[in-house]
């Protein structure tokens, strides 16, 4: 990704993130969060992870945040806008940030300083050797394209098949739980 | 560096031509078609007068052009009308909302393949702005942002009916996004690819998904697997088309702007060009929705009948102009589908809100899920042994029966909660 695009999207993301807590109005905050997510999706796409970027928009921006907004709009916002902010939440937030930064510095100082290989034709063709000759993934790789969706699918369904199935069951249980809870009759 | 500038120039040309010269004029054109076609359905005449006023220049008669200039006159009127902002609205969001409905609809244009590649002087150029490998997902992701425009319009208007319209729209769009996404999984399984250009190329070579009657340039009956796949493909087509109607807030699902209940719904407080932008957004979404349906199910730019190979090879000197013919074919199909949208709007009565939700969650969601398994079974059948196929088919039938039974049971009215 050209570096100016990286700076553009990370600026969008940071401004969005800062605006989430800076705005008094919850609807503005939710929309800033959407901006932040769009910036994040831009960063993913810049890293050639088209699928992750698009799913980021589809799931978080298009579904989760819409539901957030939906709920926020049904609330009485006047109270929220007037509420004064105490010192305690601010301190807790700062402590979290500091803890996170310390952790990040700790991890970064211990990991080796390596650059990932460029996604040029040579790297991709070499990677194609790991897959069966006539598969779609190998074809795309020898073409010099990164078939990210096929690769994610391949990894999920071969390497992480059992966790994937378990997650599916977990989601199903959660869905059924929600339906039964919301349909429970008082008698 | 010159190479980079050349590429940028090509991309810019494609964006300007395909978005602003091909797709955007389709919006006023479909408004014109809407008015004329509804007039035909209701046995009226419709706008047929606005043309070139030649009598102003001293000629004897005006040139009416079947009223084709009407949309331009309408647009001019909307621009010149007073742009009134009510005092009780939340200004920033009120101004943002119309833009948020139009912009996503126009962004999605960039992955639609308009025709086969054209080449001049040995330089081939695809007739698609961004040929990315996640076409349909990109369209869903970006068009899911449209909901913000409508929701914010309803909320920022700060009055009763727009707000109800906005809330209805949010619930409706989220519900139908699910069946929209699930219904095309069989199609993606079949093509094994998410690149829209490749999907269309595959259909041009092997027959359209809903008309698989030619292969490699020869007309003939499809093999057993393709013929069997026609069933899940058709179910997917039905669910997808109806969900697109719901996603674009078109009749019979235009509950968010239902005028008998909500005045004008989410755009009640809007006037002038801001009001027109909502309509532009709706029509642009309709154009893109039709384009997606055509691309996935009806062969995209492909002319069909095994003629595509021949058309791509047509050339004058080094200029291969087959892509332009394909583009014409695509636009013809697009117009036909827009006419279908209009026909449905003026002939089918509006749904009730509970019926709408039921159709989305109880019928389409389950049907799309079962359809995924059916399609997977048909696609995997050649590599499975007969007992496994039979077991799969029986299992599928049992699951289908169970789901229909549950849907029937859930129709019983629950006892009211005691307060």
Image (tube, rainbow, N blue to C red):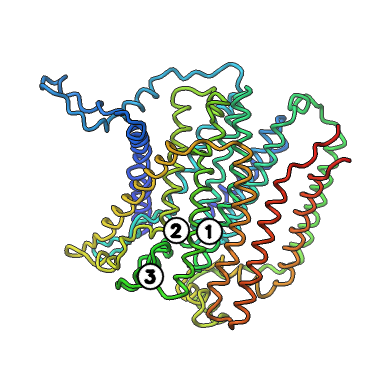
* Chain letter behind tag 2: B
Q: Please name whichever residue, A148 or A123, is drawn nearer the observer in this view of the structure.
A: A148
Q: How many marks?
A: 3
Whole-percent x, y for residue B404 in the image: 66, 56
Residue at (27%, 62%) from the top-left corner?
A: B119
**Alpha carbons under labels 1 and 3: distance apart:** 19 Å
Q: Does label 2 or label 3 sit earlier along the sequence?
A: 3
Label 1 sits on a secondary structure element that is loop
Q: Position of residue B312 (x, y in %)?
A: 27, 65
Quick one: label 1 or label 3, which is nearer the N terminus?
A: 1
The residue that appears at 17% across and 24% down in the rendered structure is B62
- Report the Cα–Cα distance between label 1 and label 2: 8 Å
Residue B206, which numbered label? 3
Which one is nearer the viewer's eye here, B208 or B322?
A: B208
Along the line of sight, which residue is nearer the eye, A114 or B236?
B236
Quadrant (top left/top right/bottom left/bottom right) for the C terminus of chain B = top right
Q: Residue B184, which numbered label?
A: 1
Q: Residues within 10 Å of mark 3 (few under 14, many from 20)?
A: many
The CA distance from mark 2 to mark 3 is 13 Å
Asked if badges 1 and 3 are on one and the same chain, I answer yes
User: Do the residues under discs 2 and 3 have CB atoms within 8 angstroms?
Assistant: no
Residue B22 vertical position relative to residue B405 in the rendered view, above or below = above
- Left/right of residue A15 with respect to residue B78 in the rendered view: right
Task: Assign a secondary structure to mark 3.
Answer: helix
* Chain letter of the residue carrying label 1: B
């Amino acid at each position: 990704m050209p570096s100016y695009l990286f700076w553009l999207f990370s600026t969008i993301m940071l401004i969005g993130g800062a605006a989430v807590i800076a705005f008094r109005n919850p609807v503005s905050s939710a929309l800033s969060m959407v901006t932040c997510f769009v910036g994040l999706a831009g960063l993913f796409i810049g890293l050639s992870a088209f699928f992750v970027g698009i799913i980021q928009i589809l799931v978080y921006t298009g579904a989760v945040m819409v539901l957030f907004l939906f709920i926020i709009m049904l609330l009485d916002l006047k109270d929220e806008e007037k509420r004064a902010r105490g010192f305690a939440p601010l301190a807790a937030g700062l402590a979290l940030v500091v803890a996170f930064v310390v952790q990040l510095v700790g991890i970064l100082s211990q990991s080796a300083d390596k650059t990932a290989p460029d996604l040029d034709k040579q790297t991709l063709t070499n990677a194609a050797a790991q897959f069966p000759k006539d598969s779609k993934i190998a074809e795309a790789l020898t073409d010099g394209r990164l078939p990210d969706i096929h690769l994610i699918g391949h990894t999920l369904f071969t390497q992480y098949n059992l966790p994937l199935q378990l997650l599916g069951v977990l989601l199903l249980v959660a869905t059924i739980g929600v339906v039964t809870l919301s349909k429970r009759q008082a008698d | 560096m010159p190479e980079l500038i050349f590429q940028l120039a090509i991309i810019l040309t494609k964006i300007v031509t395909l978005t602003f010269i091909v797709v955007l004029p389709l919006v006023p054109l479909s408004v014109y078609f809407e008015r004329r076609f509804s007039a035909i359905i209701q046995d009226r005449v419709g706008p047929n007068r606005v043309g070139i006023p030649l009598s102003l220049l001293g000629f004897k008669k005006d040139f009416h052009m079947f009223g084709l200039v009407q949309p331009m006159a309408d647009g001019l009127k909307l621009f010149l009308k007073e742009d009134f902002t009510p005092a009780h609205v939340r200004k920033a969001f009120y101004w943002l909302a119309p833009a948020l409905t139009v912009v996503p609809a126009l962004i999605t244009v960039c992955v639609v393949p308009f025709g086969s590649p054209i080449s001049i002087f040995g330089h081939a150029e695809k007739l698609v702005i961004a040929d990315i490998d996640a076409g349909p997902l990109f369209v869903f992701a970006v068009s899911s942002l449209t909901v913000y425009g409508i929701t914010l319009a309803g909320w920022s208007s700060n009055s009763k009916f727009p707000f109800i319209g906005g809330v209805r729209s949010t619930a409706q769009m989220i519900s139908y996004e699910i069946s929209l996404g699930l219904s095309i999984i069989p199609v993606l399984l079949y093509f094994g690819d998410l690149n829209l250009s490749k999907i269309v190329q595959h259909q041009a070579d092997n027959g359209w998904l809903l008309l698989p009657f030619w292969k490699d340039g020869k007309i003939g009956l499809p093999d057993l697997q393709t013929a069997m796949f026609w069933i899940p493909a058709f179910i997917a087509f039905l669910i997808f088309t109806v969900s697109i109607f719901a996603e674009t807030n078109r009749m019979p699902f235009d509950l968010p702007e239902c005028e008998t209940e909500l005045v004008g719904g989410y755009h009640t407080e809007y006037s002038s060009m801001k009001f027109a932008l909502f309509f532009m957004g709706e029509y642009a979404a309709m154009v893109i929705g039709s384009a997606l349906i055509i691309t996935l199910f009806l062969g995209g730019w492909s002319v069909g009948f095994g003629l595509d190979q021949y058309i791509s090879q047509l050339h004058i000197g080094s200029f291969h102009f087959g892509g332009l013919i394909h583009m014409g074919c695509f636009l013809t199909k697009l117009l036909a589908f827009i006419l279908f949208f209009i026909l449905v709007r003026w002939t089918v009565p509006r749904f009730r809100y509970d019926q709408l939700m039921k159709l989305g969650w109880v019928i389409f969601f389950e049907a799309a899920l079962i359809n995924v398994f059916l399609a997977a079974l048909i696609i995997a059948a050649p590599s499975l042994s007969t007992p496994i196929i039979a077991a799969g088919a029986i299992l599928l039938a049992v699951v289908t029966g169970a789901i229909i039974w549950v849907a029937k049971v859930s129709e019983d009215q629950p006892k009211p909660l005691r307060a």
